[in-house]
Image (spheres, rainbow, N blue to C red):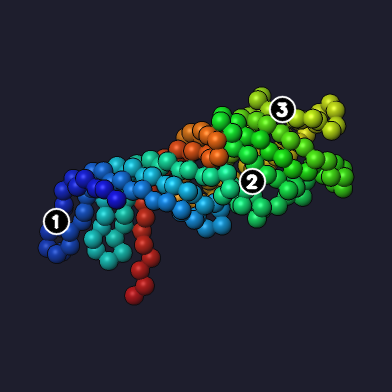
Amino acid sequence: MRTEPAGERQETGSGNTDISIRNAQLSAQEVQIGDIVRLEELRLDCQGVEIGARRGGPVRIAEANARLIVSESSLNRFLSLKPDDEVRELQVAILNGKVRITGRYMLLGRIPVPFTLTAVPEIEGGARLRLDPKQMSLIGAPIPGVATQMIGDRVNAYLSRTLDATRLPIALRLTGLTAETGRLILTATASLDLRPNVSV
């Protein structure tokens, strides 16, 4: 972790010193975020960090910009823990600029229909991952007509519910997504105001 101090602020008569940091950077590998997802790499660039030195003092970050890398294997491992009733046995292959998803669509709730879907991933509402419906195709469609839309809509509903940044304990806004062979690279931004719980 690298920091660039902006100075210290002495509280008159209190004996406490608050810490102000203009810029701080953090790089970490293999970061597990609860049961949500595992990040292969996390890089943070924080601007305007204020740390209250007193017991239970707040930690404020005016702006935190993050770069997060999720590998194909980590994503598939996570999805296997969050099964869906209508699209089952999902496997994601991350390609350059797009993803290929294979699985079984439960037609009428009981007939498993194998499918392979290719699409361009994107961020929806700054919080959720989904597939661009305008750049989606079904390979070897086993059912004609609306098969692509039916399966694509169901896969999107599952991804939006499962890969949702609003479930995180901080207000994080996703700002970008890039698919490279074997991994997804996400960028995000947040401002933080943390107040530790202190027991007496």
Quadrant in which residue 131 is drawn: top right
Number of residues whose C-alpha sits closer than 10 Å to that of mark 1, classed few (under 14), some (14–19) or many (20 or more): few
Q: Residue at x 59, y 33 (%)?
A: 95
Q: Residue furthest top?
A: 134
Contact (Cβ within 8 Å) of mark 3 with mark 2: no
Q: Disc 3 designates what residue?
A: 137
Asked if residue 102 can be seen in this view, the reply is yes
From the viewer's perspective, is 199 left or right of 6? right
Q: Disc 2 designates what residue?
A: 161
Q: Percent from the top left, x then y, of residue 59?
A: 31, 54
Name the one closer to the observer, 25 or 41: 41
From the viewer's perspective, is 10 left or right of 116? left
Measure how far apart labels 3 and 2 are at the Cα level: 22 Å
Measure how far apart labels 1 and 2 are at the Cα level: 47 Å
SS category of the residue bearing label 1: strand
Measure how far apart labels 1 and 3 are at the Cα level: 62 Å
